[in-house]
Amino acid sequence: MSDNLIRVYQKQDVNAIKPHLLIYGDLGGSCASCNKIDIKLESKNCPGCQTEFKYISFRNVRVHVPKILKLLEQNPALMIIDYEDYSRNIGAMKAHDFLK
């Protein structure tokens, strides 16, 4: 049996995701809640605000596929969030709030 990554779309509240999201780039991560940088991928909590990471988003997911497989093996409850979807929704929320 071969396990592969496949995208699954669900309705999610971005406001519920943001406080528990680790955004991972090429070299390190940042907390979406407090913007602390240089967070290790294996971190379960933010060293700045101590929030528990329940979600992780990769700026360039194709580069990190082996890391994603390892992460999901170690922590199957962790949800992978598409960074483009997340940032687009955050931008739309900010625009909506600005135009109120």
Image (cartoon, rainbow, N blue to C red):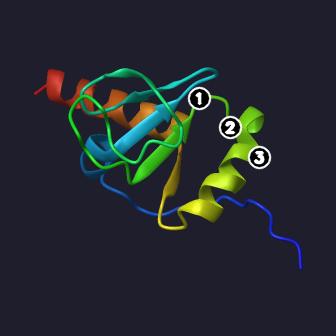
| In the displayed structure image, the side of residue 1 where residue 93 appears, left or right | left
| Above or below 30: residue 6 | below
Residue topped by disc 3:
66
| Above or below 66: residue 35 | above
Q: Is residue 8 at least partly visible in the picture?
A: no
Q: Helix, strand or loop at disc 1?
A: loop
State the residue at coordinates (76%, 37%): 62
Q: Helix, strand or loop at disc 3?
A: helix
Q: Is residue 94 at least partly visible in the picture?
A: yes
| Furthest-left residue in this view | 100
| Furthest-bottom residue in this view | 1
Q: Earlier in the sequence, mark 2 or mark 3?
A: 2
Position of the N terminus, as image quadrant, is bottom right
Name the one closer to the observer, 91 or 43. Answer: 43
Residue type at the position of mark 1? Arg
Residue type at the position of mark 2? Val
Q: Helix, strand or loop at disc 2?
A: helix
Position of the C terminus, as image quadrant, is top left
State the residue at coordinates (61%, 20%): 27
Q: CA distance from mark 2 to mark 3?
A: 10 Å
Residue topped by disc 1:
59
Label 2 neighbour load within 10 Å: few <14, some 14-19, many 20+: some
